[in-house]
Structures are given as structure tokens and as C-alpha cells.
Amino acid sequence: DAGITQSPRHKVTETGTPVTLRCHQTENHRYMYWYRQDPGHGLRLIHYSYGVKDTDKGEVSDGYSVSRSKTEDFLLTLESATSSQTSVYFCATLGLTAYGYTFGSGTRLTVV
Amino acid sequence: GDSVTQMEGPVTLSEEAFLTINCTYTATGYPSLFWYVQYPGEGLQLLLKATKADDKGSNKGFEATYRKETTSFHLEKGSVQVSDSAVYFCALRGGGADGLTFGKGTHLIIQP
């Protein structure tokens, strides 16, 4: 396993506040991803990174930003949280020679 | 763009029944295909994968065959157990490393 740790595991925040979710991996994988999971939508890609300081937008990137200053850390920031961003957020990594992705345990975010 | 369609369920079966979860896809080129499983409160785990046409992925009694002619990757198991109760996601990866495209997930419930 890639050894992916997401923090926090649960968070409740108020509308309009900034929130940062952290994904930490110990396997030196180049590619990292942030997904959100919502009922009836499956998992949808928010942003991804293909190296330090190299990131790109996914399907549902509006309202989110990311940063990757070190190989092992990929941060997802909600600049001003909205109720529509209440979701479960998953981080994933992809090794250079792997066909599959490894997922973290998720962060359940509630925006009230 | 790429897309994956799967039955959403819930699918309810009795223990030892035969399972089929249908998955069809739309993609350019030659995608790799995956089935992931999510147990309650956990992240996604890779169940099986296939990387080219006619490949059969298998794991834990589950099987799926990559059918290019019908653009399908149906998941099957001959005799399900209560412990198979979970949400199953079909997914594809295109040629690049810009993430997986998921179906909406199928909630499987196995009754004793």
C-alpha cells in the first residue's frame, strides 16, 4: 500500500470560512489526486498533481485550489466554504509503474 | 469525454446467489478498466483490473472481462457472501495520468 494519510478525518466548518485538507504519502509517488464523493455522482476529480508545483484542474475544480510544495504532501483548499462542498474527500496516488491507484481513508467535510 | 455507466442499485441478493453488476464505458483510445470496492466508512480498494481487450481480471472470486466490442466490463461472482456487502465502482483510465473516471457506484447488499 502507498501509505496515504488524510487529515483531518472529519471536519465541520461554517459557510464562508477557509478550509485546508491534507494528504500525506510515504511512497514517493509522483502523481496525486483529490476526488470528492457524493451520493448519485460516484467520485469526481477535483485537481491532480504530476509533480512538485505541477498541478492541473479536474472535472469539478471551481471553488478549490491545491498546492504541492513537497512530493509527499498535496493540500486541498476551499477558499470560502459553501454548503455544496459538503462531501467526502479522497486523496489518491499513482506510482510510476502501477496501473491502479491507492486511496486514502477519506475526509468527511460538513459545511453548515 | 470519457464516461462510465453502471447500475446504481441497491442490489439485494441472498447469500450464495450469483452476482452480475453491469458496467459499460465510453472512451477514446484503449483505456484500462478497474473495479474498486468500498466497505462502509473506508476508502476505495482495488478489486481487479484489465488493461487490454479480452483480458480477464480476477480477485477474491470476482471476475470481469474487458470486452472492447461491447465496451463492457461486467463484474461477476459465482456465490456471494454477506461480507461482500459494499459499494462497487467501475472505473477507467485513459492514456494519460490525469485520473480515473468513475461510474456512480453500485450498492450491493447480501442477506443471510
Image: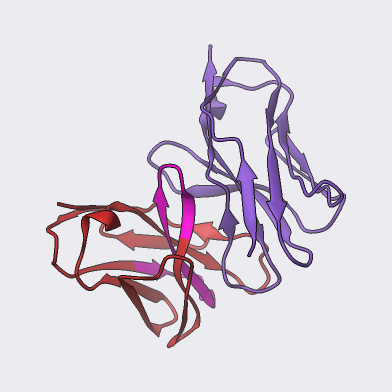
Comparing B95 with B55, the one in front is B95
- A49 vs B77: above or below: below
Location of residue A63 in the rendering, given as x and y in whole percent from the top left corner: 30, 70
Reply yes or no: does residue A31 show up in magenta: yes
A48 part of magenta stretch: no
Q: Which chain is red?
A: A
- Which chain is represented by purple in the image? B
**Residue B91 in view:** no
The N terminus of chain A: image quadrant: bottom right
Residue A30 in which image quadrant: bottom right
Tell me where the magenta segment starts and ends, as one range: A23-44
Q: Quadrant of residue B8?
A: top right
The one nearer the camera, B112 or A62, is A62
Instruction: Say which residue appears at 37% left-offset and 67% top-offset.
Output: A23
Instruction: Give above or below for B30 relative to A73.
Output: above
Question: How many numbered callouts?
Answer: 0
Q: Position of residue B17 (x, y in %)?
A: 67, 16
Q: Is residue A34 left or right of residue B93?
A: left
Q: Is B100 situated left or right of A106 in this image? A: right
Q: Would you say the magenta stretch is mainly helix, strand or loop?
A: strand
